[in-house]
Amino acid sequence: MAQVVLENVYKSFSHHQKGRIARLAPTDALAAPINDTLVIDEPEPSSGAVSVLRRINLTVQDGEFMVLVGPSGCGKSTLLRLIAGLETLTAGNVWVGDRLVNLLPPKQRDIAMVFQNYALYPHMTVYDNLAFGLRRNAIGTGDVGIDHETSLALKPQQSPFSLEEVLTTLTRPLPPMLRYWSERERAIDQRVRTVAQMLQIEPFLDRLPKQLSGGQKQRVALGRAMARNPQVFLMDEPLSNLDAKLRTETRAQIVNLQRKLGITTIYVTHDQTEAMTMGDRIAVMNAGQIQQLAPPLELYNHPANRFVAEFIGSPPMNFLQVEVKAPLLITHPRFRLTLPPHWEPALQPYDGKMIVLGIRPEHLSLGVAAPKNLPVRVERVEALGSETYLSVCFAESIAVNPAASCLQARVEPDRSIGVGEMLWLSIVPDKIHLFDADTGMAIEQSSR
Ligand SMILES: Nc1ncnc2c1ncn2[C@@H]1O[C@H](COP(=O)(O)OP(=O)(O)O)[C@@H](O)[C@H]1O
Ligand SMILES: [Mg+2]
């Protein structure tokens, strides 16, 4: 196990590079003196190059479950591929444990990666898919959750031409009783069975991938990564191909397994629910940069900027332009609100200025006619039974600016509400968020 540290990582692609996978010389990065690493000054992408990742600094603790979340195209996969060694860095450093791996080829990084399109070998059984990587490669020597003796026996293969290995390979198609088992093959067998048991795929060991459901195939792909007993797991949207129910189940299984094995894991997803439910910490990415790094509830309660505020939470946060009128008074053409006193210091510089008020759908509730409440017309109702989602608009202002004057609200399901109905919504004052209108950065209340 190991921590993973990214220092000032930059990546740009030049156009002619598109689709190419970088091949690295097997240089021994350990031998390279520290000052021999790649530049850390902010590099200008050369002409024609597209900057995909900028100034990524991230420390993933030993044993941590880190989620990278962000919209499609923000650079998540590129970042994972840089860590795995499938892409070359434009600048910066990648450390795995105490090893600088910038120039190490993927095989020497002791990292296992699970992709969205789990490519299993179609002509091999589940067993052979799990054993394949172990038979070919030197593998991790840690004994994470897996029998210690097994790991010790799994030394790198000395020579594939030793009598033992030749006999093992030749007799592999025979029934187990008739086969020759080298010590190494026995250790591989034990490892495969341990992993299969953990992932509950033991009953399928003799099947071919085409005889498995999507969820079972996904678990085999996970198993193949686990069997290698790596220092670090990288997972790139591994659940995207599963249906909703299976995704929820497999999500829980991955989290449990990761807890059990304690292997440092970096998990990529574009799905904020997946991020919120799985991560010890979450790095929210947008346009090649980390917007905020925090535990799930910290992101929800204290988003650092409008992007995070909108991305985390479903349905997303509502935003309204308001004016700061007096130290604690904010006004909107349709309502005025007095804020709790702890906002005062933070709002002082904004006196007389426009700012952005953010309020989540779950922090709006049905209220009475009052200047502090929002008079709205119901445009759409989604009654789910347990809760009701409303799309509402400020009635008179729709013509002026349709987008800015509509909101989503999540209200108690008890009262039936019809489309076209006029309502007053009240804002829970402790739950508001305020943002600088120009920079989009959160205005921090002082009591934090
Ligand atoms: N090999 C490549 N050559 C050029 N551009 C690339 C290459 N790989 C990815 N990109 C670009 O980098 C950006 C980030 O891609 P990616 O890391 O796959 O995003 P994500 O995984 O967050 O959806 C995209 O705009 C994509 O087009
Ligand atoms: Mg991707």
Image (cartoon, helix red, strand yellow):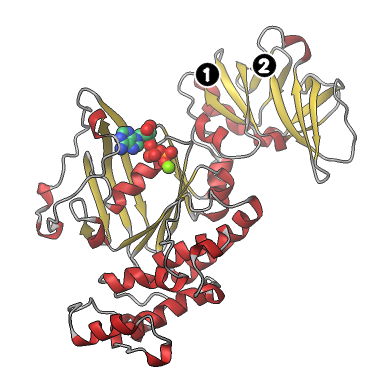
User: Can you say whether 158 is above or below 363 in the image?
Assistant: below
Query: Measured from the top left, where is residue 401 in percent x and y?
Result: 65, 11
The quadrant of the image that shows the N terminus is bottom left
Q: Earlier in the sequence, mark 1 or mark 2?
A: 2
Q: Nearer the viewer, residue 232 or 350?
A: 232
Question: Is 98 on the left or on the right of 125, as rendered?
Answer: left
Q: Nearer the viewer, residue 17 or 387?
A: 17
Checking the image for residue 350, the label placed there is 1
Residue tagged by mark 2? 331
User: Can you say whether 268 is above or below 391 in the image?
Assistant: below
Q: Nearer the viewer, residue 242 or 329?
A: 242
- Res 53 seen here: no
Query: Residue at the location (38% across, 80% down)?
Result: 173
Query: Measured from the top left, where is residue 432 in percent x and y?
Result: 64, 32
Query: Residue at the location (21% across, 31% down)?
Result: 43
Query: How far apart in space, not on screen, are marks 1 and 2 (Cα)?
Result: 13 Å
User: Can you say whether 77 is above or below 200 in the image?
Assistant: above
Q: Looking at the image, in which quadrant does ligand 2 appear?
A: top left
